[in-house]
Image: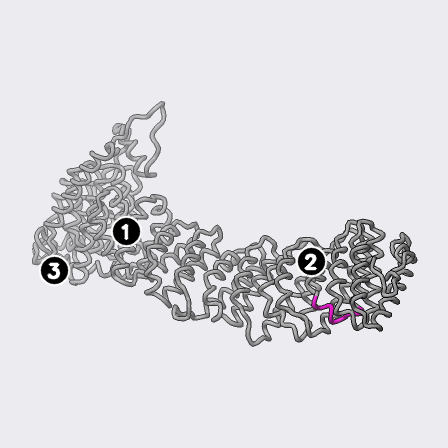
Amino acid sequence: MTKMADGMPLLSASTQRTLADKLYEKRKNAAREVEAIIRGLVVQQDHARISSLINILVHDFALSPQSNHRKGGLIGLAAATMGLGAEAAQHLEKIIPPVLNSFTDQDSRVRYYSCEALYNIAKVTRGELVLYFNDIFDALCKLSADSDPSVQQAAHLLDRLVKDIVTESDQFSIEEFIPLLRERMNVLNPFVRQFLVGWITVLDSVPDIDMLGFLPDFLDGLFNMLSDSSHEIRQQADSALAEFLQEIKNAPSVDYGKMAEILVQRAAFPDEFTRLTSFTWLNEFVKLSGEQLVPYYADILGAILPAISDKEEKIRVVARETNEELRNIKAEPADGFDIGPVLVIARRELGSDWEATRLEALRWIALLLDRHRTEVLSFLDDIFPALLSSLSDTSDEVVSLVLEVQACIAGDAQHFHRLMVFLVHKFKIEQTLLEKRGTLALRRLCTLLDAERVYRELATIFEQETDLEFATTMVQALNLILLTAPELAEMRSLLKQSLLNPAGRDLFVSLSASWCHSPIATVSLCLLAQAYHHASSVIQALGESDINVNLLVQVDKLVRLLETPTFAYLRLQLLEPGRYPSLLKTLYGLLMLLPQQSAAFKILRTRLKTVPSQTFMHMQTSLPPSEFPGLSAIRRTASAGGTYSQILSHIPTLQSSSANEDGERSSDSINGPLGINFAAQLKQFEYMQHQHHLYQSQNKPPRRTLTPPPPQNGHHPPRTSDDVADSIRRMRAPSQVRMPQQRSSYRS
């Protein structure tokens, strides 16, 4: 045992026994004796014996296996520090470690007395204790979650004292403390979290400590606390975050980038409050310094777009506002703006389950195309398939916006052709897309890209299409749009001038080749162009081929379209049958194709009954002014079910001179007035129909003709058209079909 110079031990045997007594009062009395001995040695400046005595207290007591010895050692070290007074700083490196080591003692009373001892040591040393702050903070962090309430209370008192010391000290190093704080922020224990938030708040309140500069190091931990099960912890974390956000608004310089990465991650967190706070911060960041966030555009956008469709309304509102703020920032590639990742995010969100998100993704693509067209087009191979897939979207608004983006891409000739080819291919592989979205897509593109340009390009594509059945379907769809869509009114007007206007002629010729895929589409085009002679020639050519249900359905549709405003001019021309005999021949040809019991037959027959017999307007001078020759005979033959050739025999052929004079545009079998070779057109039509016949015989079983197959198991086959199919079935029993009664005369 270490002795004094006179041979006496530093601690008497009695003092040592009392210091290890189980009673606190006796240990306290022994601690007073230790304090007195230390004071005496301080007066003598005998630091060697002071160190020796401290060693005794550490090794024989504080680190003893006996709990009472450890308790005595702790109170003895506190007493020694009090005895040292101002001289304590040079001995703290021996005193502090054993005290902190006792913070993890298995005996809760030892842990309690370790807090008490350090409290007394701190009161004496004050600022000198800051040098050991990290170790003390780590120990207190563990004690804050102690299972013993008395230990927790003691640790709390010690924590308050240490906070006071740190806030007063000018030796505290925030740089050394932050790594420890960052490590501890991941702890889930609620008591530890309260302890950490408390320290963050205290340190942030110290003017000389720049906690804002180190915010990225512990920001994620604070956001993680927003989803804690304890309302108090959530409230404390939210309060701390609100204070930091206010400081950011007032700070001249902030590192937004690192924090933006954290916010983006937290924006996808399941907890609604965490997401809302994240978007609130992102919103403020974009407003405060959007330019600094340019390199993080893609990440921020990847968080915002899904949130636009969030189930929580507050989040949706903030996300939309942030999105608008982000769109208003005009970033350039020279500033570090990388368009590729932004397009990747937009393309990804095109597959979102939520319509609002898909719409906003499309608006971003459109915005980038407007601002950085060249750069976006370099990624066309990546985004174009996704845009085409979006045509199948269930939302009309999404499809419309997709078409706007595609139209924007197709501003250049090369991209226009590519768009048309891709669109046709998409319709070809997805039949349902053509059925559900084909009309919308084509009409919208006609509006955005010029209808004539779209139709010319599509006509060129379908003229070379090898899948003839698909080509027929597309031509029929295009023809129906041409005849009905308001967007194509100007194009219809141009086609009406095909026999007078070079531009109309060119358009008619460019469409006619592909329109040959569908006989009735060809007839419709001729009626629109007022090339009635060619229309009647096409109908006559149909007599040499099989008349199937699909053809009759198309005839049915055309007859109904003839009653629409689009063909009002044609119906008015029927007032002058002498002037337009080929028109009359065409309409009677259509009538002869239809089953007599179909609704279309009745509609067209009713219309033809209104054709006046008196031909006093623009008649040939060689004809008597009383009645158009053969008109009554035509009606009687049609009512009696006569053949088309019998009907045509009653319709005179006008001389070309008088036809030109009266107004029926000369459409003879060779050339029209503007050089349209209708003879070649007819040959082309016949050739195309022959190709269709070969294609059907090679690729599909024969189509159903006018005579349907016999019923199976007593059931008739499914209907293909409401009126036409009914009429076909009636034709199986001609004896049961009632023919219309012949009329002896027709009223004018």
Q: Is residue 128 magenta?
A: yes
Note whether residue 153 is visible.
no
How is the structure coloured here? one colour
Q: CA distance from mark 1 to mark 3?
A: 25 Å
The reply to whether callout 2 and callout 1 are in contact (CB within 8 Å) is no
Q: Nearer the viewer, residue 477 or 3?
A: 3
> Label 1 is placed on what type of residue?
Leu
> Label 2 is placed on what type of residue?
Arg
> Label 3 is placed on what type of residue?
Leu
Q: Nearer the viewer, residue 86 or 610?
A: 86
Q: CA distance from mark 2 to mark 1?
A: 68 Å
Rendered view: 597 above or below 604 = above
Percent position of residue 137, x then y: 70, 62
Residue tagged 1 = 478
Residue tagged 2 = 193
* Disc number placed over residue 674 in the picture, else none: 3
Q: Quadrant of residue 170?
A: bottom right
Label 3 packing within 10 angstroms: few (<14), some (14-19), many (20+):
some
- What residue is drawn where x is 56% and y is 63%? 318
Q: Quadrant of residue 172?
A: bottom right
> Furthest-bottom residue in view?
252
Q: In the displayed structure, does residue 588 sit left or right of residue 353?
A: left
Q: Quadrant of residue 26?
A: bottom right
